[in-house]
């Protein structure tokens, strides 16, 4: 593809007074890691790539399955059976060739979390289990990395920014993960497809606000109930 004028692609962001050219430069120079290329990771990846985040890491170790397609919209029927990382890389490259995609086809665990996370400015947790969520949170605290957190189930979601400019982290609101015998998940209870799209888009919005230095809801978790169509912010 021939070289293009960045202004032509990003003009609608640059026109925003609070972003402008300087904000777009910050976006282009940002390094963001998205952990999980599933329900939450898909819209985060989609909108960060579209916004022009210069380096976008994607960490996942799963393969695309047919039941993913109701909500994981960066993947297609032709992706079924392929690694989610490869599918995400293809999506990013087709959407925005200016974005450098770093695919990490690994499960994040205590042996590699610090090495993987240390190479990025901002971390986005789109994982689907508490073990990974707490490991990512604790690693971000140790490395002083801001973390954008989200979770979904059924009709409900949660969003927060952790560990940013001295703000609190996951353990300040939930000190310990729940017992594994009492953990609901999407595999057993399901999730309505648009919900992760909404929550993930809001997570991407928070990432871009961190990058460009815009105001953020710190020490606050946003609770989303799309069944009752209610949104609440709870301070912690």
Image: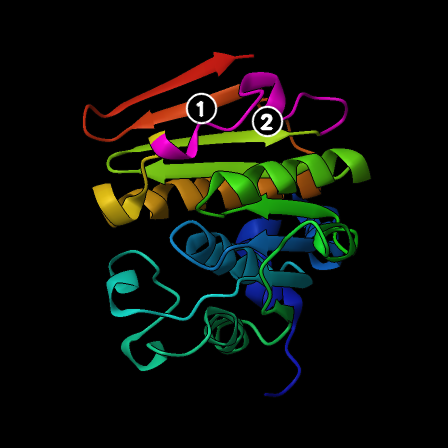
Residue 10, compared with residue 64, is above or below; it is: above
Q: Is residue 148 left or right of residue 211?
A: left
- At a point 69% along the width and 35% down the height, the residue shown is 138
Front position among marks 2 and 1: 2
Give the percent coordinates (x, y) of residue 96.
55, 72
Q: CA distance from mark 2 to mark 1?
A: 13 Å
| Quarter holding residue 214 | top right
Per the image, the residue denoted by label 1 is: 222
Q: Is residue 19 magenta?
A: no
The residue lying toward the viewer, choosing from 138 and 182, is 182
Give the percent coordinates (x, y) of residue 27.
68, 53
Q: Secondary structure at mark 1?
A: strand
Q: Choose the circle earlier in sequence order: 2 or 1.
A: 2
- At a point 50% along the width and 55% down the height, the residue shown is 36
Q: Is residue 95 left or right of residue 70?
A: right
The residue lying toward the viewer, choosing from 158 and 230, is 158
Q: Which mark is residue 170?
A: 2
Q: Is residue 167 magenta?
A: yes
Over which residues does the magenta segment extend? 164-181
Few, some or many C-alpha atoms within 10 Å of disc 2 (few <14, some 14-19, many ≥20)?
A: many
Q: How many marks?
A: 2
| Quarter holding residue 158 | top left
- At a point 56% along the width and 53% down the height, the residue shown is 35
Q: What secondary structure is the magenta-colored segment mainly?
A: loop
Give the percent coordinates (x, y) of residue 163.
70, 29
Whether residue 216 is visible, yes or no, is no
Q: Residue furthest top?
A: 235
């Amino acid at each position: 593809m021939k070289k293009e004028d960045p202004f032509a692609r990003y003009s609608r962001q640059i026109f925003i007074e609070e972003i402008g050219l300087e904000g777009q430069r910050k976006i282009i120079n940002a390094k963001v890691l998205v952990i999980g290329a599933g329900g939450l990771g898909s819209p985060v990846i989609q909108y960060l790539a579209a916004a022009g985040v210069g380096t976008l890491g994607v960490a996942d170790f799963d393969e695309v399955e047919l039941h993913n397609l109701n909500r994981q919209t960066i993947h297609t029927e032709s992706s079924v059976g392929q690694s989610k990382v490869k599918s995400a890389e293809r999506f990013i490259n087709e959407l925005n060739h200016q974005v450098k995609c770093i695919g990490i086809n690994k499960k994040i665990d205590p042996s590699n979390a610090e090495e993987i996370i240390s190479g990025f400015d901002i971390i986005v947790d789109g994982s689907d289990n508490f073990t990974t969520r707490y490991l990512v949170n604790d690693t971000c605290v140790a490395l002083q990395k801001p973390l954008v957190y989200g979770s979904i189930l059924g009709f409900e979601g949660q969003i927060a920014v952790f560990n940013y400019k001295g703000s609190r982290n996951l353990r300040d609101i939930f000190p310990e993960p729940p017992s594994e015998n009492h953990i609901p998940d999407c595999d057993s209870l399901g999730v309505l497809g648009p919900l992760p799209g909404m929550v993930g888009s809001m997570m991407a919005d928070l990432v871009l606000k961190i990058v460009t230095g815009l105001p953020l809801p710190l020490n606050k978790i946003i609770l989303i109930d799309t069944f009752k169509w209610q949104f609440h912010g709870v301070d912690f």
